[in-house]
Image (tube, grey):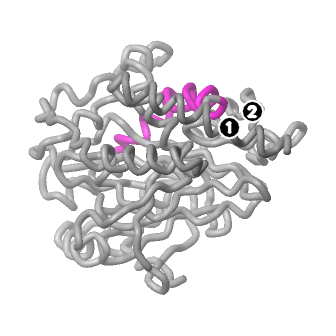
Amino acid sequence: MRAFTDSTPIMADGPALRRRMQEDGYLFLRGLLPREAILAARAELLEIAARGGWLKPGAPIEAGVANPSAACKDPEPRYLETFRPMWMNEALHRLKRHPNTIGLFERLFGEAVLAHPMFVLRNIFPAREGFDFTTRPHQDRIHIGGATSYACWMPLGDCPMQKGSLAVVPGSHRKGVLEFRIGTGAGGLETAGDFDGRWVSGDFQAGDALIFCDTLVHEALPNRTGELRQSFDCRYQPASQPVSEVSMQTYANMFTWDEVYGSWQGTAERYYWRAQEPKVVPFDTSYYEKRDEIAFAMAERGETAARDTLLRIVQRDRDEGKRARAQALVTRLDSGNRGAMQN
């Protein structure tokens, strides 16, 4: 796998950043945020992980050594129980609008920046026999909608490739949304196609960032260490462009913003976007509708690979009938698995 093109030397040059983004679809930047700010947020999240039983008993919390017996993943209920207080963490939210990041996007866009209120937090347990969950090749556009947006992906702590750093396919953003299929990794979808020989990746230090367009094909490498791999990715766009309603909500719309802010000490980041008066547009559900029909057909055939997508429908879909159908299929799949194990 080839190494990222390092865009750190042109970090202050807006036109150069735009040219490279147009060509490659990504920017790899060393030291975008202060290392100490990342590690401070990481420490708070690891405390939550420890309380949830995710870390190895007796090991130093700051080492982030995972408890293999606690391995779980989004959208499983046992994962969400510990994930919820993590996502509400004030220190994590403050990182989203750090002046270094906002300044970078202002140079890239040449105008004011809207940081999407919603962001993604990943907790990836080490891969082992029976559990190998990561983020498969996909494009963010399907999940975000609105105008073109750009992700800023950062690991919470040092992240060498063997811990599960991100990899991208340069230039893949130019063809729009590609065909996809149901996947078992984070996000529940994966892009169909052969990208062998085209991937680039690299090691990350705390504070390094990968910026990429919402149609760039990307994936996370497997976590082959003994540690929990934590990362967050926030989305940004020109403030003058429309933003999808889903990007204005909390993650999977599982809280109200008042609930998120309830335990915070500071006030500066609360409802920061209101002053920008963003133009909010409906979320394009067409890709999800296609995904859901594929998942229903798979589940009817007894294919357990559809289970995570069905759980997403149960937890997040507005259609009561679809939720009921998905829950019935989850129950059927689980019953079939239990019967197979007993035999």
| Rendered view: 173 above or below 239 | below
Number of numbered tags placed on the structure image = 2
State the SS at label 1.
helix
Locate the N terminus by quadrant. Answer: bottom right
Q: Which residue lies furthest to the right in this view?
A: 58
Do the residues under discs 1 and 2 have CB atoms within 8 angstroms?
yes
Give me the residue at 20% from left, 54% from top. Answer: 148
In-image side of 142 versus 194 (left or right): left
Give me the residue at 58% from left, 30% from top. Answer: 80
Name the residue carrying label 2. Answer: 50
| Rendered view: 49 above or below 81 | below
Name the residue carrying label 1. Answer: 46
In-image side of 299 versus 338 (left or right): left
Distance from label 1 to label 2 (Cα)?
Answer: 6 Å
Give me the residue at 54% from left, 62% from top. Answer: 220
Q: Position of residue 222 (x, y in %)?
A: 64, 63
Callout 1, which amino acid? Leu
Residue 134 sits in quarter = bottom right
> Does residue 81 show up magenta in the picture?
yes
Q: Where is residue 225 in the image (x, y as percent from the top left)?
A: 75, 61
In-image side of 337 versus 256 (left or right): right
Can residue 254 be seen at all in this image of the molecule? Answer: yes
- What range of the chain is rendered magenta? 78-98
> Does residue 9 show up magenta in the picture?
no
- In the image, 128 versus 27, the foreground residue is 128
